[in-house]
Image (cartoon, rainbow, N blue to C red):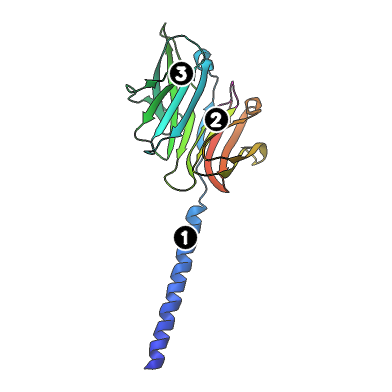
Amino acid sequence: METSFFSNAGRLCRLAIITVILLTSINAKLLKTPLEPFTIRSVAEVENSNQLSLFRGESNRQKKVVLRWAMSSNEQFTYTVEKSRDGQHFAPVQTRDIEKDAHGQFSWVDQFPKATNCYRLRITDASGKESYSKTLVVETFKTGDVELVGATPQVSMNDIQVDVQLKEQSYVIIHITNDKGEIVLQKKEKGKAGINQYMIDGSRNLQAGDYFLKVVVNGTDRMLVHLIKS
């Protein structure tokens, strides 16, 4: 009877250990699941968008995405925020609550951000002529050491800008690879708590082709964008 008791206890112990190992293995696989790339086509920005001196996103205390932008021109423009699920097809969103501060900077809060968000601005001048900003891709995070990663991956006129909003000091690696997986541009930085802004110097000079922009924070992939430059 005693032997039976310890034998059963041993089997239960082994079963518990195996269960823990299986769960650990599953969790490890989930954590290592590669990011699905978000495809952005790099097209020529035009006229008014070239006057856009700032266009980025940040996360507020309510975990909403705040878009901020500013123009270098004193001309009067109207703005329409457009959003996309695939980076290709955009639709206007409700933007009656666009605000302008004392420094001439505009902001709009996306009350319903997803994990991956894709934005652009439709800019209309006084004559009714329309143009578009670069596409802004924003990744949001509810847990961990990163709050937000944003990038403007189109490279027709300017270098790629990447913003990383951190909860604490972290190691940030940004690199661009070609379709063969070879690194063509790379930036390594020690980011501070708060918003960190990086410019990928030379990215505007990339030849036509397929590229991947990856942002890694403390060894973990945080953003992967498939960039097509024609």
Is residue 74 visible in this depiction of the protein?
Answer: yes
Residue drawn 45% across and 20% down?
105
Q: Along the horizontal axis of the image, is 183 left or right of 215?
A: right
Task: Name the residue carrying label 2.
Answer: 153
Numbered disc in front, either 2 or 3: 3
Nearest the viewer among 210 and 79 is 79
At a point 50% along the width and 17% down the height, the residue shown is 49
On the image, numbered disc 3 is attached to which residue? 103
* Residue located beneath label 1 in the image: 26
Label 2, label 3: how far apart the Cα atoms are? 27 Å
Q: Earlier in the sequence, mark 1 or mark 2?
A: 1
Spot the residue most to the bottom.
Answer: 1
Residue extent of the magenta highlight:
152-159
**Residue 92, percent from left and from top:** 36, 24
Disc nearer the start of the sequence (3/1): 1
Q: Relative to residue 44, is residue 2 depicted above or below?
A: below
Q: Is residue 150 above or below residue 55?
A: below
Disc 3 secondary structure class: loop
